[in-house]
Image: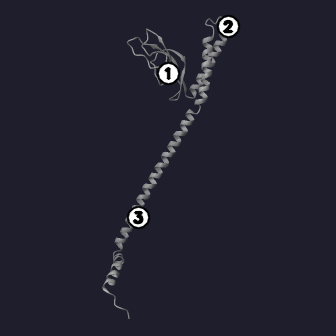
Amino acid sequence: MTEPKNESENETENMQDAPAEQEALDPLAAAQKRIAELEKQLGEMKDRALREMADAENTRRRAQKDREEISKYAIANFAKEILVISDNFRRAMEAAPGDHADPAVKNLVVGIDATERQLLATLERFGIKKIDPMGQLFDPNFHRVMMEVDAADKAPGTVVQVLQAGYVIHDRLLREALVAVAKGGSAVPRVDTEA
C-alpha cells in the first residue's frame, strides 16, 4: 500500500502536469505557437539571405568597376614614357630651319610632322588626349605655371605660352601642361603659381 501524499507533493505534481495537460487539451495553441516560432526563424533566414545576396552583388559590382578601371588606366605609365617621344618630335619641328629651302630639310620636317601626327592619333585611340591651354585661364588642375610674363593685351592668369604640352587619359590627368601666364598689374592680384 502506498502512503498518502501530503498536500505540498500533490500541488507540485499538479503544477508539473498542468502544462502537459494544457498542451494535450489545446494542441491547436501549441501548433500555432510552434508555427509562429518557425515563421520568425524563416523571416530571419530570409533577411540574412537577402543581405548576403546584396553583399555578393555589391562585391561583384566593385570587382567589375575595379577591372574596368585597371583596363582603362593600365597604360598610364607606358603612356607617360611615350609622351617624351612626342615632346622630342615637337622640339625637332621647332628646331628645323624656318625657310625649308633645302628639299632634304623640307622632306625631313614633313616626315617628322607626319610621324608626330600618327603618334598623337595612336595615343587618342587609347584615350590619351593633348591639352591645349593656350589663351585659357590658368587651371591648377591641368596646368603648372613655370613663369609669369608681361602681356598687356591679356588678362592676368591667361596662358600665353605652352612650354610643355599636357595630356589626359580618359577623364584623368596624365601629365600637367607647363605654361607661362600673363602677369597682372599692381592693382590686379597675382596668380598663385604654387597651386
The residue where tag 2 is placed is 103
Q: Looking at the image, is mark 2 or mark 1 nearer the viewer?
A: 1
Q: Looking at the image, is mark 2 or mark 3 nearer the viewer?
A: 3
Q: Looking at the image, is mark 3 or mark 1 nearer the viewer?
A: 1
Q: What is the spatial separation of the Cα atoms under label 2 and label 3, in whole angstroms?
A: 93 Å
Dots 2 and 3: beta carbons under 8 Å? no
Residue drawn 59% across and 30% down? 77
Colour convention of the picture? one colour
What number is the disc on residue 143? Answer: 1
Q: What is the spatial separation of the Cα atoms under label 2 and label 1, in whole angstroms?
A: 38 Å
- Percent across and percent down for residue 152 are 43, 8
Q: Furthest-left residue in view?
A: 7
Q: Nearer the viewer, residue 74 or 120?
A: 74
- Percent across and percent down for residue 19 are 35, 76
Q: Nearer the viewer, residue 116 or 140?
A: 140
Q: What is the spatial separation of the Cα atoms under label 3 and label 1, in whole angstroms?
A: 66 Å
The residue where tag 3 is placed is 38
Which secondary structure lies at badge 1?
A: strand
Which secondary structure lies at badge 2?
A: helix
- Kind of residue at disc 2: Pro
Q: Residues within 10 Å of mark 3 (few under 14, many from 20)?
A: few
- Percent across and percent down for residue 183 are 45, 13
For marks 3 and 1, the one nearer the N-term is 3
| Image-quadrant location for residue 43 | bottom left
| Image-quadrant location for residue 21 | bottom left
